[in-house]
Amino acid sequence: MPSNIHPTAIVSPTADIADDVTIGAFTIVEGDVTIGSGCKLHSHVHLLGKVTLGENCTLWPGCIIGGAPQSVGFDENTSSGITIGIGNTIREHVTIHRSLEKGGLTRIGDHNFLMVGTHIGHDCVLGDHNVIANNTMLGGHISLGHHIFIGGGTGIHQFARIGDHAMLQGHASISQDIPPYVTAAGLNNIVGLNSIGLRRAGFTPATRREIKQIYRLFYRQELNRQQALQAAEATEWSEAAKLFITFLSQNSKLGYCMRTR
């Protein structure tokens, strides 16, 4: 066990903890938890069950990682867990629930910033470099790509998919899939491209123009999704634009957010 564990912390003897991990007062680590090098757990953190925490993560007071899914009839004896990548910041009172399925995992990628009160439901899959603001609620089985910003108070329905570099404005209510690069607000409204986010991400002016062109094809030409996909086949696109087309061509459990305000 590392030496920098507060004497009031409770740490399971079955936990696998790197030597340089810091664990604060009244933190509880129970079960087969694995904590990578460089992690810091502030006071009153609770890790339980099969949780793997990658290197250099910081967990702030009150967050609970590994709780049972909020699903009626779930058998708490089901063996499932959570895997969290490197460099994540998990702020106060964040909750992340383990998978609903036997042997399943809720997955968090690398370098995500989960702000106060965020809830990540069972079987969610998050990519890398996402910023999720205060009191955001993610239902079960949600898939987030990379470099996404979600404004505070947003609620996202279970099984929804959110594409790379999308931005969801605060208090959005999302119950359909959101394509890459767009800005969404309100109830399933697409309100434009995430232009500032694309510039900050380093997309060249030429690539941004092409993304704008493909966006207009789907959202400004009064075509339905299938018509727009057929029209897109007539043009050779860059990889960035292809990502938009590929996302909208895949099967969706909830359908696609195609409304514009």
Image (cartoon, rainbow, N blue to C red):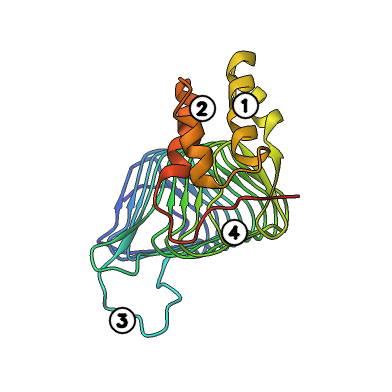
Nearest the viewer among 50 and 250 is 250
Determine the residue positioned at 48% across, 45% down.
Answer: 226
Dot 2, how many residues are within 10 Å of its Cα: few (below 14), some (14-19), or many (20+)? many
Answer with the quarter of the image where residue 77 lies.
bottom left
Which numbered marker is on residue 241? 2
Give the residue number, with chain letter if any, for mark 1.
Answer: 213
Residue 17 in the image: state x and y as whole percent.
Answer: 32, 49
Determine the residue positioned at 61% across, 57% down.
Answer: 92
Give the residue number, with chain letter if any, for mark 4.
Answer: 118
Nearest the viewer among 195 and 35 is 195
Asked whether disc 3 touches disc 4, contact meaning CB atoms under 8 Å apart, the reply is no
**Mark toward the start of the polypeptide (2 vs 3):** 3
**Mark toward the start of the polypeptide (1 vs 3):** 3
Which numbered marker is on residue 30? none
Give the residue number, with chain letter if any, for mark 3.
Answer: 75
The residues tagged by marks 1 and 3 sit, at their Cα atoms, a distance apart of 49 Å
**Kind of residue sitting beneath label 1:** Gln
**Kind of residue sitting beneath label 2:** Ala
Answer with the quarter of the image where residue 246 lies.
top left
The residues tagged by marks 1 and 4 sit, at their Cα atoms, a distance apart of 34 Å
Residue 85 in the image: state x and y as whole percent.
Answer: 39, 43
- Specify whether residue 218 is in view: yes
Q: Secondary structure at mark 1?
A: helix
Q: Which label sits in the foreground, 2 or 4?
A: 2
**Mark toward the start of the polypeptide (1 vs 4):** 4
The residues tagged by marks 2 and 3 sit, at their Cα atoms, a distance apart of 44 Å
**Kind of residue sitting beneath label 4:** Thr
Dot 3, how many residues are within 10 Å of its Cα: few (below 14), some (14-19), or many (20+)? few
Q: Secondary structure at mark 2?
A: helix
Residue 165 in the image: state x and y as whole percent.
Answer: 57, 36
